[in-house]
Image (tube, rainbow, N blue to C red):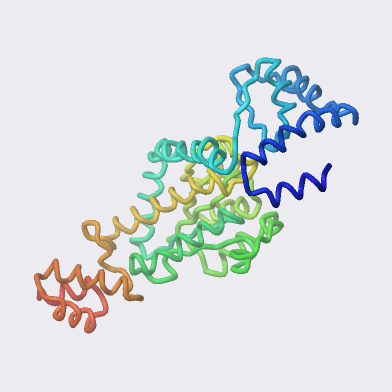
Amino acid sequence: MGKKWLDIVYNEKSSIKLKQHYKSWANDYDQDLIDWGYAYPSQLKKIMSQDIKLKKSSKILDAGCGTGLVGIELKKCGLSRQKVRGIKDLARKIINKEDQSVANNVKDAIPQIDKLVKKIVKQLNKNGRLFYIGSGTSGRLGVVDASECPPTFGVDYDVVIGIIAGGDKAIKKSIENAEDDFFQGWKDLKKYNVNKNDFVIGIAASGTTPYVLGAIEQCNSNEIPTGCITCNPGSPLSKLSKFPIVVNVGPEVVTGSSRMKAGTAQKMVLNMISTTSMIMIGKVEGNKMIDMQLTNDKLSKRATKMVMTRLGVDEAKAKDLLTRHKSVRLAINTDKI
């Protein structure tokens, strides 16, 4: 029956006929499982209702449910089951629904973000630097935010620095065991001569990553201001950091996959940190990226429009000013003089 089923699945173009085939085989499929002594549904029912003691209001996602034998048993003990039919349902009913909660979770952390950014601004105004350090997804997100600051705000590449466990090669290829070295994080920071004028943010969804914990601990010992972004309340990282940011996003759709809600929350927080910090040190005027680097046609056209609007000049004059000064800020301020 297996080969025949696969042939039909891959060759049948009519979804209606495919459902008919499925229904015709469903009873045989269930009977085969019974004949083979398949006891998983009843065992799971016992585990869910007695050992785990789930409430009747609890919801269970039954993925890869076959003919629904498990769901039938769970329903008998009063538990509800989330029905998911295809990719659209999975995206809408599960993933997108969970993602919608992240913004509110981040909103709850704004008081913590406020305290952290105020300290960062003080450090930057002392010619200090902002460091992000993390591993895996958390490290990559830090590197992304740091790399976007120079073209967006016109700061030098050594003002906001992202460090990832395993080095730059870990950005593209996962090096999972790199996060387990408690001492390497501090060694990586020392390559940049990190000092008291700087600010170091450890990023770790779990708040337990040795690579990050070791770095933050040594920063504290050397009187270097520290913060963190974590999604685990009460974690070691949140207790160790002087300016912790904790965004409690709850369980992931795929258990333990912190690249999902936790990653989204971390990216949102990083956006807030870098953007508000740059605004506070004068790298944005109004809502315009006045210090952006003119590195491509899109940014050059945007800069031209900004100069035309601010100075009331035509396109040719705006382009001439930008060609001479290489900066929106300089083009505007020099022409005023």
For the C terminus, which image quadrant?
Answer: bottom left
Q: In the image shown, does 104 or 65 lie closer to the viewer?
A: 65
Q: Is residue 130 above or below residue 7?
A: below
User: What is the residue that sits farthest to the right in this orientation?
Assistant: 36
For the N terminus, which image quadrant?
Answer: top right
Identify the residue shown where x is 47% and y is 51%: 267
Identify the residue shown where x is 57% and y is 49%: 259
166 left or right, relative to 101: right
Label tally? 0
208 left or right, relative to 300: right
Q: Quadrant of residue 64?
A: top right
Identify the residue shown where x is 55% and y is 46%: 260
Q: Residue 274, percent across and down?
A: 39, 56
Q: Residue 127, percent across and down?
A: 37, 65
Q: In the image shown, does 48 or 278 lie closer to the viewer?
A: 48
Q: Residue 131, percent across and down?
A: 48, 60
Q: Is residue 190 above or below residue 105?
A: below
Q: In the image shown, does 72 or 228 lie closer to the viewer?
A: 72
Q: Quadrant of residue 80?
A: top right
335 left or right, relative to 203: left
Q: Is residue 24 above or below residue 286?
A: above
Q: Quadrant of residue 191?
A: bottom right
Q: In the image shown, does 89 or 100 lie closer to the viewer?
A: 89
Identify the residue shown where x is 62% and y is 16%: 56
Q: Residue 88, percent across and down?
A: 53, 42
